[in-house]
Image (cartoon, coloured by chain):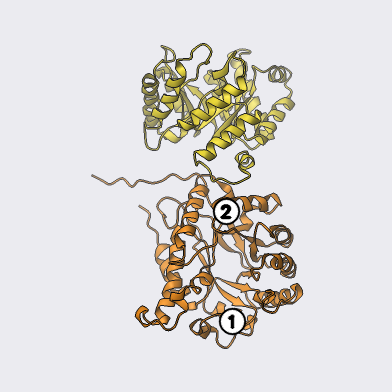
Amino acid sequence: MFEIIGERINGLFLDIREAIANKDPKPIRDWAVKQAEKGAYWLDINTGPIASKEEQAEIMAWLVKTAQEAVDLPCCIDTTNPLAMEAGLKVHKGKAMINSTTAEQAKMDIFLPMAANYGAAIVGLAMNEKGVPKSAEDRTALAMELVANADAYGISPVDLYIDPLVLPVNVAQEHGPECLEALRQVKLLSNPAPKTTVGLSNISQKAPNRPLINRTFLAMAMVCGLDSAVMDACDDDLVDTAATASIILNQSIYCDSYLKTFRQK
Amino acid sequence: MAVTIAKERWTSKVAEMTLGPKGLKVGGESTLPFLHFEGEMPNRPVTALEVFDMEPQDWPDILKEPFADVLNDPVAWAKKVVEYGADMVALRLMSAHPDWKDASADEVAKTAKAVAEAIDVPLIVLGCGVEEKDGQILPVVAEALEGKKCLIGCATADNYKSITAAVNGYGHSVIASSPLDINLCKQLNILITEMGLPLDRIAFDPLVGALGYGIEYAYSIMERARMGALTGDKMLATPIVCFVGMEAWKAKEAKDPDVPEWGPQADRAILWETTTATTFAIAGGTIFILRHPESMKRFNAFIDEAMKPNAY
């Protein structure tokens, strides 16, 4: 089953930033409900680049609680700040997702034990202190580091979501095929295979025809083994594309109402 | 070096249905059939024997013999089925068939109620098989049986609306029947849930064939549906009804008394029904509607063995 991680509760969006500033739960709840109805499996929660680290922790806890009061969905807690991460995990109901660690040892040593401790899934970015590798092979090598380190903490590959990192097609075109190939290779790293994810809308940053680029890339990436994506759950054409790709890949049993059942949990 | 047992990790499970006055549970498994080392199979597959509401016209003598004194009395027949040890009674309202007595909804509902009140096991009520007629009689039957938590069928793409509404309103469960097509099976389950009946009150019937008569088609459907169910495809994660008796006793190997080279009919007929049933148990069948008590006994002997723990 393809897992949509709804991207909308993010302080980068103006309405969410204002909701955070005013402690107004309504926009958070509304977006939680709307994304759930549109087929989100996880809710990405990101405070945005505001406030101090301590305030971020408090805001994250509030966002997670507010979202989970509105819907029965798990959250993908999206921050680089370990304090905010832990604050979100503490108040989270059910199995959370940590978004994310890189393959840097120092980061893995913070976030992997946290995932093990809270029984959370975790996103592992195929990058390290040197940045995002160019080739598929180098991305896969970093993915292997993530799989091995996760295993050392007793985290199963099925709870590790490798993100091979998508770069915008208009400035880093040569990364496209490498990223897709990395998805294929990651699926061969272990048995059971690691899960995979991407931040989908990166592919179309600052390009015209963003929705078209997003959904084309999504279908291509699913063929290569993409299991989930942080994406716009409210883009109906995009979700329809995911549903149709999942039918063609025989991931769920065809029926005439498949566009609808894909959105039901 | 110790052998590592490869175990599949399933993420979902089949809905658990509760039937009858004592709350018989069926379904609920979180692994493929009998792989107790990979998951739970909380309830064993269950059996029902068929009872007709009129003397069956096309049953061979060997099948009539265990019920010889009750073939004209559905209530007595149902009691006999319980004595034989069936988990449920499956009452087939054949008299409603336009080619037979064309009995009215009220007439068959009266019979159904009498049978339900004579037994303490769950009752399955089956229409006459003519979709239009079943769409008329089964809602009336459902009303007459209010509170008995029966399993009522079969609902098809053409008549599911009236049947589902009544089943939902009077607290029963429904059998959703589609002809050997997994996509149609799923679609019908969806249409029924969209009318408000929860998934744990639907069992689907993929239309099984007997051994030698297309058994492999239904086998593949069940296998695919189970693997889907265990990986999160909820719309097929319901118990599966197998009309084994009806199909097995259509086979010439079961009903033809005069083929000496095939051996005695008493042996091969029972074997035909038993083998068809055990095959579907392995494929993921849940509710087995049989006809001969001896087949049921042998089937249960197989299930006894298959349900023994095999955890590593």
- Work out whether residue A95 can be spotted: no
Q: Is residue B233 above or below residue A147?
A: below
Instruction: Give residue B231's position: percent from left, percent from top.
Output: 50, 45
In the visual, does A264 lie left or right of A195?
right
Please provide percent x and percent y for residue B278: 44, 66
Chain represented in yellow: A
Q: Residue at the spot x=52%, y=72% of the render?
A: B245
* Label drawn at residue B216: none
* Residue in the picture at 61% in, 55% down: B200
Q: Quadrant of residue B104?
A: bottom right
What chain does mark 2 sit on?
B
Residue that mark 1 sits on: B57
Instruction: State how far apart marks 1 and 2 are (Cα).
Output: 37 Å
Label 2 SS: loop
Report the amino acid beneath label 2: Ala
Label 1 amino acid? Gln
Dot 1 or dot 2: first in sequence order is 2
Residue A193 appears in the rendering: yes
Query: Which residue position is annotated with label 2?
Result: B15
